Every structure is written in C-alpha cells, then in structure tokens.
Image (cartoon, grey):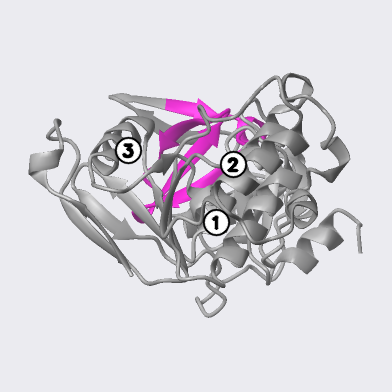
Amino acid sequence: MAEFIITPEISDSGSLPAFTLTLRDFEAAAIYSDTDLQAELVKALRGQAGLQVFDYEEGLYTRLTVENNIAFFHKWFGCRVPLSEILVQFELHHCAGRPLHKCSESEIRRLYYAKYYMSGAGSMVFREPVQGVDVRTVNTLIRMLSKLKEHPVSVLILVSGMEHARILGDAAYKLQSDGIQQLEAADEDTAPEPEVPAAAPKTAKLFKIPAKVDDKIILFDPPEIDYIESRDGKAVLVINNESYAMDSTLADVEKKLEVYGFYRCHRSYIVNLQKVREIITWSKNTYSLRIDNQAESTIPLSRTKIQEVLEKFSLE
C-alpha cells in the first residue's frame, strides 16, 4: 500500500491543495489537472523520499540500438523476464536493431515503459505517459499496467486530459486549487437516460448556440462545435480544444442539437458525429472517439452506445 501525501509545507505555491491519496497494492490511480498544478504536484512528489517520477526525459542511450538499451537495463535491474519477452511485450521486436536516434517518438516511449517496468519499483509515478503517442503505444501502456497488477505495485498516473485519466486509472481524480475529488465512473450504464422525443423534428428552429465568454455572449453555428461536455452540472462547448461555458444542462442541449447530427455518446458527452475521425477500442474493453480537430481530441464512448454509433456510420 502506498500513500501520496501533499502538505502545505512541501508546496512552494498556495495553489496546490493539501491532500492524502492512499493506493492499495495492485492498484493504478490517475490524477487529472491543468499543467500548472501538475508541475507543482510533480515537484512536491519528487521531494518525498524514495519516490521517483517517470517523465521520459533522460536515461536512455541514443547511440545504442533498442535491443542494446533493453539488454543494458535488463542486466542493471536484474530483471527475470526474458529479454526477448520484454521486446515483444512492449512492441519493440520489429525495431530491436534500430538506433534510438532513428526511432519514432512512440517507439522511444515504449522503450521507456520497458525500462521502468524492469526497474521493479514498488511505487511508480508516471507523468503524461501517453501524450503525443499512437494508439499502439497507449495499448502497450495499458497492458503494462495490467501486468504490474500481478505484483505488489502501486501506480500513480498524472495527466492533463480527463479522457486519459479514465482510460488509464482504476480510479480517476480531478485536482484543482480547492482540492481533489474522484471523477464519476467513465461508463454509467445504470444512469437514467434522458427522455427522447418520439420523432426528430423535420426542421431546425435553432441556428446558433449561445455560450459565455467573460461578459459577452458568443453565438456558434452547430457545425463548428466538436463536442459538448458536462462540467459541474453545466454544458461546455469545445471547439479546437477551446472551452465555452453555457447556461444549459447537457440534457437541454441534446434535444436542441439532435437534428444537426449530434449524439449523446456518453453520460457526460455529446459529440458532433460529423467531426468523428476514429472509433478506438482500447485493450481494457473501453472505447473512445477521436475528433477531427487540431488537438485530435479523444472523448469517451459508452460501451452501451458502441453498437448505435457503428450503425450510424453504417459499419454494422
């Protein structure tokens, strides 16, 4: 069992709240926060004796091949898993003979995963482990986290995206300056569904969607919107990773936008189906939609909605 304790004394800034997070062995938890709070949390965690934050910034030998790096750390940490098995487990066998300076960012990240896995640390803290990597690499990390649960290891994952927190952690938390709170489950199958009209209207009465920015009200065309998220009970428009608050609830917005091709893909999300680029199946039986925007945003897709989405795209 591991305790991650943050007190006012170990934080140089008043914006990082004091909290204690206790993780059982064989458990992974993810903390979602903005990048500034994350940086303060990393600094505070590094001040705790014997705790290392894995941030993929150093410790590899760029002039050596992938296999030679694995072999070095395999011997250094006294890893008992066969080297060939490590290469396959972390999807590195196809690039084993390649020098690091010729590897992709995702291949380098998987090599870091392998190094940290072989280290045998009792408590692990990962900072932004899947930022900027491909789906194969995300799945590799998920498989590694599953493997770690076979040992008495506690894992803390720090991310700046809520969807990554839900995908990677057994439990997910949101950290803000006023405290830390656990996020609701990513898939609320038992939650009551909002009432759906018997038939969609044939014509749309609403042409603009209002949102607030400071003291102004901005009107958006529905096709501009990537998706709409529920935050603290209120709907928030997201356009190219920029957020705009609304006075409406998600249920209110759903009824108005259904005719424009928007779909309630999750209890907390409504997506513009015209903006969906990929339907992603993760290895732990969870699903996401990747949005065709500049940020390549991913949002959760409820497992109870996957069949409907496939049918809407004629993929059945």
Kindly tell me whether residue 252 is visible in this rendering.
Answer: yes
Q: Is disc 2 placed on a helix, strand or loop?
A: loop
Q: Is disc 1 placed on a helix, strand or loop?
A: helix
Disc 3 vs disc 1: which is toward the camera? 3
Identify the amino acid type marked 2.
Val
N-term mark: 2 or 3 = 3
Residue 290 to residue 100: above or below = below
Residue 248, percent across and down? 41, 49
In the rendered view, does 236 fall on the left or right side of 174?
A: right
Write the residue at 52% across / 50% down: 119
Q: Which quadrant of the structure image shows residue 137?
A: top right
Q: What residue would you read off at disc 3?
A: 42
Q: What residue would you read off at disc 2?
A: 130
Write the residue at 72% across / 25% down: 64
Q: What residue would you read off at disc 1?
A: 168
Which part of the image, by quadrant, shows the N terminus?
Answer: bottom left
Q: Nearer the viewer, residue 47 or 168?
A: 47
Which part of the image, by quadrant, shows the C terminus?
Answer: bottom right
Disc 2 vs disc 3: which is toward the camera? 3
Write the residue at 67% across / 29% down: 293
Q: Nearer the viewer, residue 71 or 31?
A: 71
